[in-house]
């Protein structure tokens, strides 16, 4: 039997990781400035993370949500404390797409409505409801087109208010920072006004912080730069540092009842141990402040390179846009300097999502490789 071939792969087999680096089968070291789609928040194989999971596995690795799992409450309290969202309730799942599914379901239960407003270039996942609010028709199967949704222009207040004014909108869903769409940061005034419009017209505001949350933006959640209070917040990726876990932070106005939501694996013992380890490392090593500081250095330095048209982002969620396709530059950085970077839906954008543990040495190494490759690449060939 062969694998179902849906992934364009680098011809590299990664066998181990340490901090901001990964190593292939030959022992070559690579600087990881992509973090496996923003998943690696506290670095590869962090000792505290490994210890937490190992110790938990020696006790019990899994039991279902038919029994009390105290680790879940411990995780909820720690997440509330570090994020500043103590009053929210936490529902634990296994992935970002599952978090979006449940957030949309809760919004519809709460309002009794079905129409969703999303945004151009949005990516919210590949499952049934999540993919329906993802702005990419090539991955939306016919059976996924199950409810009304509109994709609105980014940072366009007039469009949001006009669509909400009819009173038939269930929810507005927006990424704290658009990731796959090319790293687009919502204007703070725009976010604040969207929040006000949702309250005025009885719509639920869902903040997708799956990629932008957990300190990546220099705040625990990217929406906190705008000072708003969403109704629902979805998390995953950096939450488990590679262990599958996600969640929905639910405003107290939503009332729980038995059977409303459910999952077999969500919030299992190992997942909670991994997620607690992540929060403990973020707190103890002051990684949110580090993300803000290193991100500011990177954004400032990258904007000064000839050939760079625009640098966007907050903290360690950065998009670099060129006047030519970024693919050849990314490949050269990987081949010649052993530096992993990410792509975006726009072929001219390079995404940077290094671990929040990235230090001065790694930033300098990245900038050196970036500058060398950018200044010596044949732009005339690339532009063709």
Image (cartoon, grey):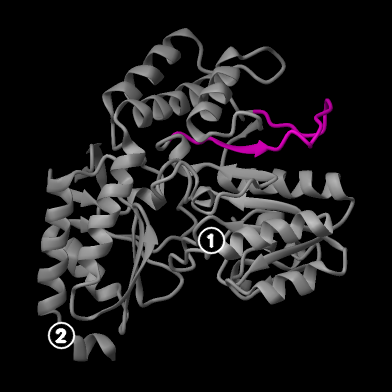
Total labels: the figure holds 2
Magenta range: 243-264
Say which residue label 1 marks. 188
Pick the residue in front: 338 or 80.
80
Pick the residue in front: 103 or 32.
103
Q: Against 312, is 241 above or below?
A: above
Residue at screen point 59% across, 71% down: 136
Distance CA(mark 2)–CA(mark 1): 39 Å
Whether pointer 2 and pointer 1 mark residues with C-beta atoms closer than 8 Å, the reply is no
Query: Quick one: label 2, few (<14), some, or many (20+) residues within 10 Å?
Result: few
- Position of residue 351 measured from the top left corner of the image (x, y, whole percent): 35, 63
- Quadrant of the rendered structure where residue 266 is? top right
Magenta segment includes 259: yes
Q: Could you tell me what secondary structure mostly forms the magenta stretch?
A: loop
- Point out the tag, 2 or 1, that comes first from the N-terminus: 1
Q: Helix, strand or loop at disc 1?
A: helix
- Position of residue 318 measured from the top left corner of the image (x, y, whole percent): 35, 61
Say which residue label 2 marks. 378
- Position of residue 366 measured from the top left corner of the image (x, y, whole percent): 17, 57
Magenta segment includes 112: no
Q: Against 378, is 204 above or below?
A: above
Q: Quadrant of the C terminus?
A: bottom left
Q: Against 168, is 15 above or below?
A: above
| Front position among marks 2 and 1 | 1
């Amino acid at each position: 039997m062969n694998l179902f071939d849906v992934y364009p792969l680098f011809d590299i087999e990664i066998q181990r990781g340490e901090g901001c680096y990964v190593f292939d089968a030959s022992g070559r070291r690579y600087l990881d400035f992509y973090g496996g789609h923003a998943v690696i928040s506290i670095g590869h194989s962090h000792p505290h993370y490994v210890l937490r999971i190992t110790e938990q596995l020696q006790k019990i690795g899994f039991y279902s949500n038919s029994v009390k799992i105290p680790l879940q409450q411990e995780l909820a309290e720690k997440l509330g404390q570090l994020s500043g969202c103590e009053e929210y309730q936490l529902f634990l799942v296994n992935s970002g797409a599952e978090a979006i599914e449940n957030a949309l379901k809760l919004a519809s239960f709460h309002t009794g409505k079905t129409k969703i407003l999303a945004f151009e270039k949005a990516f919210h996942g590949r499952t049934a409801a999540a993919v329906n609010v993802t702005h990419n028709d090539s991955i939306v199967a016919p059976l996924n087109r199950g409810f009304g949704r509109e994709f609105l222009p980014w940072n366009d207040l007039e469009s949001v208010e006009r669509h909400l004014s009819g009173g038939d909108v269930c929810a507005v869903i927006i990424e704290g920072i658009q990731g796959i769409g090319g790293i687009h940061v919502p204007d703070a005034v725009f976010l604040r006004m969207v929040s006000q419009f949702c309250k005025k017209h009885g719509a639920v505001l869902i903040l997708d912080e799956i990629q932008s949350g957990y300190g990546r933006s220099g705040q625990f959640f990217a929406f906190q730069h705008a000072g708003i209070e969403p109704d629902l917040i979805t998390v995953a990726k950096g939450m488990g540092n590679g262990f599958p876990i996600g969640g929905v932070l639910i405003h107290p106005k939503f009332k729980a009842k038995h059977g409303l939501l459910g999952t077999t694996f969500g919030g299992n013992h190992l997942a909670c141990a991994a997620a607690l380890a992540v929060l403990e490392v973020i707190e103890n090593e002051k990684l949110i402040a580090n993300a803000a500081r290193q991100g500011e250095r990177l954004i400032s330095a990258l904007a000064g390179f000839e050939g760079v048209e625009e640098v966007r982002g907050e903290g360690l969620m950065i998009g670099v846009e060129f006047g030519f396709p970024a693919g050849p530059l990314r490949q050269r950085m990987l081949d010649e300097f052993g530096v992993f970077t990410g792509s975006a839906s726009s072929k001219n954008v390079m995404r940077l999502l290094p671990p929040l543990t990235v230090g001065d040495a790694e930033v300098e190494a990245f900038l050196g490789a970036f500058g060398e490759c950018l200044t010596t690449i044949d732009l005339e060939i690339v532009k063709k």
